[in-house]
Amino acid sequence: MNIAIIMAAGAGKRMKSELPKQFIEVNGKPILIHTLEKFQNVDVVDGIVLVCPGDRIGQCKELVEKWQIGKCLSVVAGGNERYDSSRIGVAEALKFGSDADTVVLIHDAARPFVDSRIIEDNVKAAREYGACETAVEIVDTVLRGKNGFAKEIVNREGLYRVQTPQSFRLDIIKKAFDEYDPARDGKVTDDAALVLRLGGRVAIVRGSPANVKITTPEDLNLF
């Protein structure tokens, strides 16, 4: 079984909007639904777990019903931090799939441009290697700056920009969360980092420059 965990619990403060960005409508449809439809419409995904703000569970269930997201297995409240919400999503996926036979794809609700090729490649890589993350090579010159001035040009060879989905065999990501202690290990914003911390290997799935995360008003205008 392959389950997509859609991360929609963030507040999206950089959007400077009273409405969380995933609920902003584009062409009459919330960004969240644009994203959910990508996973609804690809055959390799069997089910969807939607992680959302606790005070918007009812709204999300209504949106799922209105837009006929039939693969949605569950809508659950997220946590205070990104890793809390990921952990909750993984725990919810365990209710529907067995540890070793299930792949979970953890994806940002604010990345509505993900395509079927990326989703399918994630499932294949997670099944073969146990863990993978979507990324694109950095092609721009990269510099390190301080106090508004350039300090040095950084060698970009081997550097990538990480996207989502990040996908895992369910038993592997469950173990990574079970052994992670934020008080001891610090906060993480990347689920694959938890697997790397345990000495696991994470394959790189080729992403796309189009698979951007809508974060700022400029991103929204681009959409």
Image (cartoon, grey):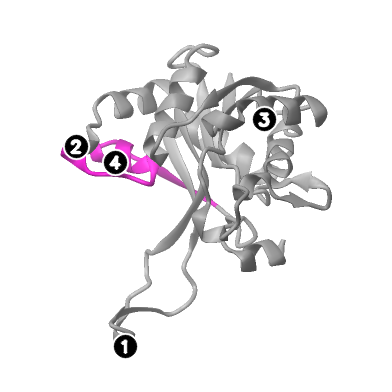
Question: Hey, what amino acid is under mark 4?
Answer: Leu
Q: Are marks 1 and 3 in contact (CB under 8 Å)?
A: no
> Could you tell me how far apart the alpha carbons at marks 4 and 3 are, in whole angstroms?
33 Å
Residue at 38%, 39% in the rendered image: 81
Up/down of 117 relative to 88, above or below: below
Q: Are marks 3 and 2 in contact (CB under 8 Å)?
A: no
> Could you tell me how far apart the alpha carbons at marks 1 and 3 are, in whole angstroms?
45 Å
Closest to the camera, between mark 1 and mark 3, is: 3
Residue at the disc numbered 2: 183
Is residue 67 in view from this perspective?
A: yes
Up/down of 17 relative to 143, above or below: above
Question: Hey, what amino acid is under mark 2?
Answer: Ala
Left or right: where does residue 24 sit relative to residue 208? Answer: right
Residue at the disc numbered 4: 196
Label 1 neighbour load within 10 Å: few <14, some 14-19, many 20+:
few
Residue 201: quadrant of the picture: top left
Label number found at residue 149: 1
Q: What element does badge 2 sit on?
A: helix
- Image quarter where the C terminus lies is bottom right
Q: Earlier in the sequence, mark 1 or mark 3?
A: 3
Question: Hey, what amino acid is under mark 1?
Answer: Phe
- Residue 41 within the magenta-colored segment of the rendering: no
Q: What element does badge 4 sit on?
A: helix
Q: Earlier in the sequence, mark 4 or mark 1?
A: 1
Picture coordinates of residue 54 (x, y %)? 53, 29
Label number found at residue 36: none
